[in-house]
């Protein structure tokens, strides 16, 4: 057993160096995963805001009896199509 310790002593710096490299790699992987998770959370929040806005509009249409519901729905649909067409057009500089 004592002979094995004498063999491990010269190898200790290499083992510690390998361990340091491995821990640095694991830390980098964790940072990348955190960034990806934060990006997904931002996308979900944005999507959630859009859905909440749509629900508010629908609630307003349903609760306001002074206007024709079908006309308002069509107007909103037309406006959304125009907005999506604007974002899809390539910008020319």
Image (cartoon, helix red, strand yellow):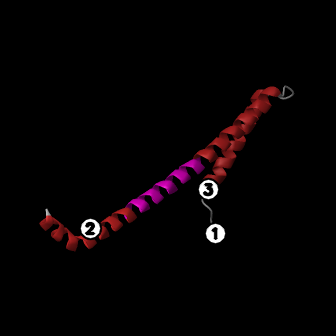
Provide residue 49's location: percent of width, then percent of height.
67, 43
| Residue situated furthest front in the rendering | 2
Above or below, 7 against 49 in this view is below
Badge 2 is on which residue? 15
SS at badge 2: helix
User: Does the stretch in magenta take in 59?
Assistant: no
Query: Are the two marked residues, 3 and 1, in contact with CB atoms closer than 8 angstroms?
Result: no
The image quarter in which residue 18 lies: bottom left
Q: Is residue 30 in the magenta section?
A: yes
Residue at (74% x, 32% y) in the render:
58
Q: Earlier in the sequence, mark 1 or mark 2?
A: 2
Residue at the spot of label 1? 93
* Image coordinates for residue 83, horizontal then vertical, percent: 68, 48
Q: Which residue is mark 3?
A: 89
Which of discs 2 and 3 lies nearer the camera? The answer is: 2
For the residue pair 60 and 43, the one nearer the viewer reads as: 43
Quadrant where the N terminus is found in the figure: bottom left
Residue farthest to the right, as pictured: 66
Q: Residue at x 69, y 38 (%)?
A: 52
Whole-percent x and y of residue 16?
Answer: 30, 68
Q: Secondary structure at mark 1?
A: loop
- Front position among marks 1 and 2: 2
- Secondary element under disc 3, as helix, strand or loop, is loop
First to last magenta residue range: 25-43
For residue 37, side relative to residue 26 (left or right): right
Please identify the dominant SS of the magenta region.
helix
């Amino acid at each position: 057993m004592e002979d094995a310790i004498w063999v491990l002593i010269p190898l200790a710096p290499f083992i510690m160096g390998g361990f340091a490299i491995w821990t640095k790699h694991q830390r980098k992987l964790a940072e990348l995963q955190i960034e990806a998770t934060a990006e997904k959370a931002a996308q979900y929040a944005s999507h959630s805001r859009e859905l909440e806005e749509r629900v508010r509009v629908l609630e307003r249409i349903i609760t306001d009896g002074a206007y024709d519901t079908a006309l308002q729905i069509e107007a909103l649909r037309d406006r959304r199509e125009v907005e999506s067409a604007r974002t899809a057009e390539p910008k020319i500089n």
